[in-house]
Amino acid sequence: MSTQPTTSQPTLPARPRRGLGRDSMVRIATAVIIIGLWEFFGRQANPLLVAVPTDVLVATWDLAKTGELFAATGQSMLAFGVGFAVAAAIGMLIGVLMGVNRTVEVALDPYINALYSMPLIALVPILMLWVGIGFTAKVIIIALFAVFPVIINTLAGVRNVEKNYLDIGKAFGAGAWMSFCRIVLPSATPYIASGMRLAVSRGIIAMIVAEFLTSIAGLGGLIINYTNQFETAKAFVPVFVLAIIGNVLTAIVRVVEDRLGAWR
Amino acid sequence: MKTLSISGLSKTFVDRQGRTVEALAGFDLDVAAGEFITIVGPSGCGKTTMLRIVQGLEERTAGSVKIDGREITGPGPERGFVFQQYGLLPWLTAARNIAFALDARRVPKAEQKERIRTALETVGLAAFADHYPRQMSGGMQQRIGIARALAVDPAILLLDEPFGALDALTREILQNEMLALSERMAKTIMFVTHSIDEAIMLADRVVVMSARPGRIATIIDIDIPRPRAGRGEEIRESPAFAHHRRQLWEHLMAREVAA
């Protein structure tokens, strides 16, 4: 899955430089037009409901000045970080166990698939009942959302190791542990990495959902609070911060992915 | 140098439709120490299966494989294997692919560096130690595959259609290198191929197999003096080569017609 729109690639590779420059111009122009239209039509709407870009800029400055924005971002990112780490660790562990042991796979497979496909938001109120509405609750919800793509991709990776690669280990007398560490895991790495990428976006959704419904803290808390106070400009600020965070995190996973997959 | 003694080797398996397939039915062969054996036969004759059983990669249904009189139960350090599709791990450099085999064989790290260097020099790829498989041609990758098998210093070398995927020219070059290696290193070698010319060029004896169930149809002694390395063209044009070629054709064709 690529988020890069393929249609924007220059079709003539002979002049990539000019093509790239032109593309950037088009993109900047599009952004200017969108922001301009938003500013223009926004000003004619009810200012209580619609904030225009200049309002959002001012609101960003306000929220930054009071430190509120940084505190909220910190709270959100801490919960996300812990939740994602838990999901990554547990997800890889379960995925590997399912991949190497058929009994574990048969036992867990139906539940993993069912939970992955169902809208997990349905579980959030019940979870709140069990674990409360604090930081732990947030972490659990994030981990729950993020863990399934990691499990499923790790399993697929461990499963799809080429038999030829395993034969190499066998032919030279590598033990099960060595074969696992040096053949199965590296061969599964691209799968695990794309599982992580999915986990990042699901984890961010979970973080916001959790903040809406539980602790009323972090970036999600800001959105809810300022929307309730009809301060739409301020409510927009965390939305943009989230957009930036989402893209930055995905880019980081991509870089790690490319590093690990340099041999391909 | 070690001798290899295979007797009554059989393999049956059940295919997806539930039918019993007899891949190998009573394969007997004694390989002398330092002998170069090539094995030819139609596809599906079980030659690869036989070789994989000897390496310990596959289970046998019946029969025995003995090295210097001792029954083998799995892969062992006295055997090195070269795979059809080079069998390199794509995420490791050439040197690390060799190091992998040395680690598996528990060769001390201190000794590995020297062994890797020697192995790469032997196949003429010392400069490519840090290259990944995808950065190398098929011929180079298979040279690395051979270097890896040599690095573990086995007495017996088993090669499963190692040059099958290479273009004709690269193939001849590697055949010549194989001859040079075998004539210099005195190893017991079993080499599976589907090329008649390759089988004659390399072997002391060519084993011809018949298909379904796989067994030995005939064994032909190759009457071409050694050393042969560097004399490829001369040998290919010799009457002895032509004679062996006709012999092998007749055996293989007779089987095809009978089948």
Image (cartoon, coloured by chain):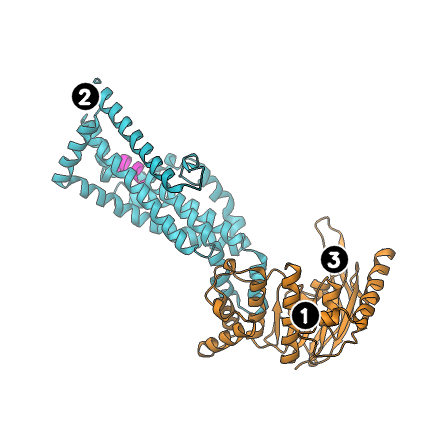
Chain colours: A cyan, B orange
Identify the residue under disc 1: B54
Q: Which chain is home to disc 1?
A: B
Residue B227 place in picture, x, y as percent:
70, 79
Judge by depth and name the residue closer to the eye, B159 or A144: B159
Residue A67 place in picture, x, y as percent: 14, 41
Q: Which residues are magenta?
A: A207-214
Query: Going by the image, does B56 lie left or right of B258?
Result: left
Task: Characterize the local packing of mark 2: few (<14), some (14-19) or many (20 or more) Cα atoms within 10 angstroms.
Answer: some
Amino acid type for the residue under numbered disc 2: Pro
Seen as rendered, the residue at the extreme left is A66
Number of numbered discs present?
3
Image quarter where the N terminus of chain A lies is: top left
Instruction: Tell me, for residue A119, which label it has, or none.
Output: none
Tell us which disc is closer to us: 2 or 3. 3
Closest to the camera, between mark 1 and mark 3, is 3
Q: Position of residue B115 (x, y in %)?
A: 50, 77
Q: Amino acid at mark 3?
A: Ser
How crowded is the residue under tag 3: few (<14 C-alpha within 10 Å), some, or many (20+)? few
Numbered disc 3: what chain?
B
Is there any visible trace of residue B70 in the rendered image? yes
The residue beneath circle 2 is A47
**Residue position marked by numbered label 3 in the rendering:** B43
